[in-house]
Amino acid sequence: MSDDTAIKPEGVVSDDHVVLGKLTSPYGVKGWFKVYSYTSPMEGILDYADWVLEHRGQRTTRRLIQGRRQGKGLVASLEGIDSKEQAESLAGAQVLLPKQTLPELSPDDYYWYQLEGLRVVTLEGLDLGRVDYLFETGANDVLVVKGDADSIDDKERLLPFLPDGVVRETDLAAGKMTVDWDPDF
């Protein structure tokens, strides 16, 4: 039996970067940003010193000077951004991280971006579609599986990401996840 877990960050921007979060808006007048983090826990984004920012088709790298929890969210200060106006010019930028700088996982752990796009097949061999994305519910993560031309139907299904329960096998090399799931759900 495996101890599979899905770990954020989520979305893939390219073959070599993942999205950790985004700069939502300026915070104060000294160039700080409000930051929306896709990492779990949310403060995990602050563990990375160099942020690749993608904004309006351009990429720049900025060093994280300081970051902290502020209310229900995060705020951060980046090197070279010293005014509200400079921060406004980067509002909406995605925060990327080169995949090679992500921590190494044990063989039965996965980042969410690795699960997105996997073909989902039941124990009986019925094709349910592909993992479109995942989300958290508090109790467990949920796989959103969308049917396509190669699946048994075009339904969207919500499957709990429960290793050794619903999710029986994940084969990244084959691009396939085997699940114990009734297709009528």
Image (tube, helix red, strand yellow):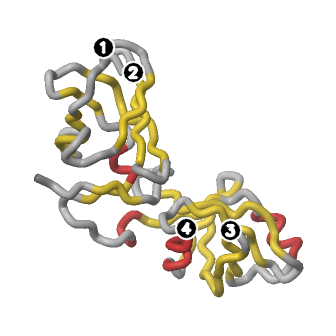
- Which numbered disc flags the more N-terminal residue, 2 or 4? 4
Question: Residues at badges 2 and 1 in contact (C-beta under 8 Å)?
Answer: yes
Q: Nearer the viewer, mark 3 or mark 2?
A: 3
- Which numbered disc flags the more N-terminal residue, 4 or 1? 4
Q: Give above or below for 149 relative to 138.
A: above
Q: Which residue is mark 4?
A: 42
Q: Which residue is mark 3?
A: 73
Tell me where residue 34 appears, x and y as whole percent: 73, 68
- Which numbered disc flags the more N-terminal residue, 3 or 2? 3
The single residue placed furthest to the left in the displayed view is 1
Question: Residues at badges 4 and 1 in contact (C-beta under 8 Å)?
Answer: no
Tell me where residue 89 appears, x and y as whole percent: 81, 64
Q: CA distance from mark 2 to mark 1?
A: 7 Å
What kind of residue is marked 3?
A: Gly
Q: Secondary structure at mark 2?
A: loop
Tell me where residue 167 appears, x and y as whole percent: 24, 41
Q: Quadrant of residue 7?
A: bottom left
Q: Secondary structure at mark 4?
A: helix
Q: Give above or below for 105 relative to 80.
A: above
Answer few, some or many: residues within 10 Å of disc 2's Cα (few below 14, many 20 plus, some between 14 and 19).
Answer: many
Q: Which residue is mark 1?
A: 152
Q: Secondary structure at mark 3?
A: strand
Q: CA distance from mark 2 to mark 4?
A: 31 Å
Answer few, some or many: residues within 10 Å of disc 4's Cα (few below 14, many 20 plus, some between 14 and 19).
Answer: some
What kind of residue is marked 4?
A: Met
Q: CA distance from mark 4 to mark 1?
A: 37 Å
Q: Residue at x 48, y 53 (%)?
A: 138
- Which numbered disc flags the more N-terminal residue, 3 or 1? 3
- Which numbered disc flags the more N-terminal residue, 2 or 1? 2
